[in-house]
Amino acid sequence: MSSLQPPVERIWWKEPIEGVELFWVAIALVWAIVMFVMMPYWHVYGKQNLSNEAYRTSPETFSNKVKAMVDQHTVRKETVREIPVVHPPEGSDVYLLARLWDWYPIIELEKDKTYRLHLSSMDWNHGFSLQPENINLQVVPGYEMVVKITPNKSGEFTIVCNEYCGIGHHAMTGKIYVK
Amino acid sequence: MANTAEFRTCPDTGLKFHKPAETLMKLNAVAGIVFLLVGGVIGLLVLLTRWPAVHLLQADMFYMLLTAHGIDVLIFWIIFFEIAVLYFVSSTLLSSRLAGPRWAWLGFILMVVGSVMTNVAVFQGKSSVMMTSYVPMAAEPHFYLGLILFAVGALIGCFVFLGTLVIARAERTYGDGSIPLVTFGGLVACIIAIFTIASGAIILIPTFLWKIGYINYIDPLMYRVIWWGMGHSSQQINVSAHIAVWYAIAGVVFGAKPLSEKVSRMAFLLYILFLQLASAHHLLSDPGLSSEWKIFNTSYAMYLAVLASMIHGLTVPGAIEARSASAALTRVCSSGCARRPGVTRRFPACSCR
């Protein structure tokens, strides 16, 4: 029962380590270094990476920007709730707002063109999760995240909320069209 | 010195139990198991709801139970049981009296009151905020107050453990060398627990004050960063404590001795240095935190903590293997083979061919 008792050798830190154990530590260390290098490597050479651009904002400021974009670029309205579908020009700032419990507005983008997508929340924490692509971003109230996006597939994509936000959480979905 | 009437010797293991400490170990362990049971049953209901063919519960009930499940299993069960482990590895393994049993009782009572209070808040239905309770989504005030009381109680338990180490040292109850490896693992768990509880207090006390109207704003991103200092680290207390328990089981059941005290203790030390930083992997997709910060905390730091786990992954079964190999060797040798020097601690058992 000696792991339950004080070390037999009082000066245990001077005991030699057996070769097989040292060998294992070396394998584990090499593996840890490989994994460590992969992360910055992927950050530099990978194609989908997190944005470093974010600003402090407030629900009022952000919703005013959304409103300005909706007023200028709405092309049609969808569903019985008359949700505007916005078709912003290439390279422009696109604003997507999260609130209890929807994503506003619906956005229509063009394939292989680049946009600056701004995300913020009006109330609680939400999670932007683009399906079926599985691209995930945290949407935190008071913060505006800006992500440079270039859609490379056309079709209809669904945004689901993947951060619990109360009783309507599971029904909180939105839409992005890529033409 | 301790009164000898307060001790009993276990007839099976020969370990010396301080009776007041033993009572507290049992109570804390039982409280832990009760929360595991409650959380486990709720977990089953959660599972039956997520299973599309059954879909047992409606949304409001589901979210309420999911909140209770997270808190009961990831905070209360783990920390109650770890306090029991801490008292065992200090008082019993060092044959020492427990420091301040009254303080330990106070800690236990606070933990019970706190955990029950938070559960009551959740089951009243207006605190379905998940274990994370991200602001500005708010729970009832007694949801936070319960967690705070629980944390204070657990902190008292940690200091009782540290006090017991000091007493055992001063009264020379275990000789004058280092503490056993299992106790060392418990000490690592305790240090991580103090960090965890401090993080919890730093964020939940202001959140409680915000809820009752004394503070008007809690930054949601700040909340997330500090909260995960508690939310993830509470699992790290468990990592360290349960590896200490593995070493203990290997010792009790197989009579195994660690391959190298130095390697095993260094691996525990890596947990203290790097494991909590890995909490940042819960914040990988957050705005406002730089990629450099995320990469540093979740790769460099996390992989050094992973390294520690990989080392324990070898040394625990390795210790058992070495012990059974040397036991086989002893049997073989006593039946007439010559003892071969240097093979007693290798993986292949002795061969007489």
Image (spheres, coloured by chain):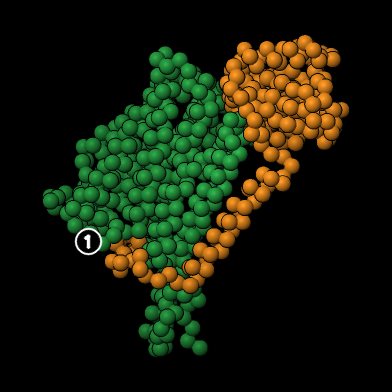
Chain colours: A orange, B green
Tell me the residue at 36%/40% (across/down). Answer: B194
Please state the horizontal and vertical placement of residue B226, each as a whole percent of the image.
Answer: 47, 32
In front: B181, or B301? Answer: B301
Q: Quadrant of the C terminus of chain A?
A: top right
Q: Chain of mark 1?
A: B
Residue B201, compared with residue B208, is above or below; it is below
Residue under pointer 1? B176
Residue B323, compared with residue B55, is above or below; it is below
Number of marks in the rendered image: 1
- Label 1: few (<14), some (14–19) or many (≥20) C-alpha neighbours in 10 Å: few
Q: Is B98 left, or right, of B323 in this rendering? A: left
Quick check: can you spot residue B273?
A: yes
Tell me the residue at 34%/43% (across/down). Answer: B83
In front: A16, or B293? Answer: B293
- At mark 1, the secondary structure is loop
Please state the horizontal and vertical placement of residue B329, each as a whole percent of the image.
Answer: 42, 79
In front: B129, or A105? Answer: A105
Please state the horizontal and vertical placement of residue B170, each as a whole percent of the image.
Answer: 18, 53
Q: Is B258 left, or right, of B108 in this rendering? A: right
Tell me the residue at 37%/28% (across/down). Answer: B148
Q: Residue furthest right?
A: A179
Q: Amino acid at mark 1?
A: Asp
Tell me the residue at 45%/15% (across/down). Answer: B216
Q: Is B94 left, or right, of B312 in this rendering? A: left
Please state the horizontal and vertical placement of residue A30, each as a whole percent of the image.
Answer: 58, 61
Residue A5, compared with residue A106, is above or below; it is below
Residue B37, compared with residue A156, is above or below; it is below
Specify the quadrant of the image occupied by residue A106: top right
In front: A172, or A140? Answer: A140
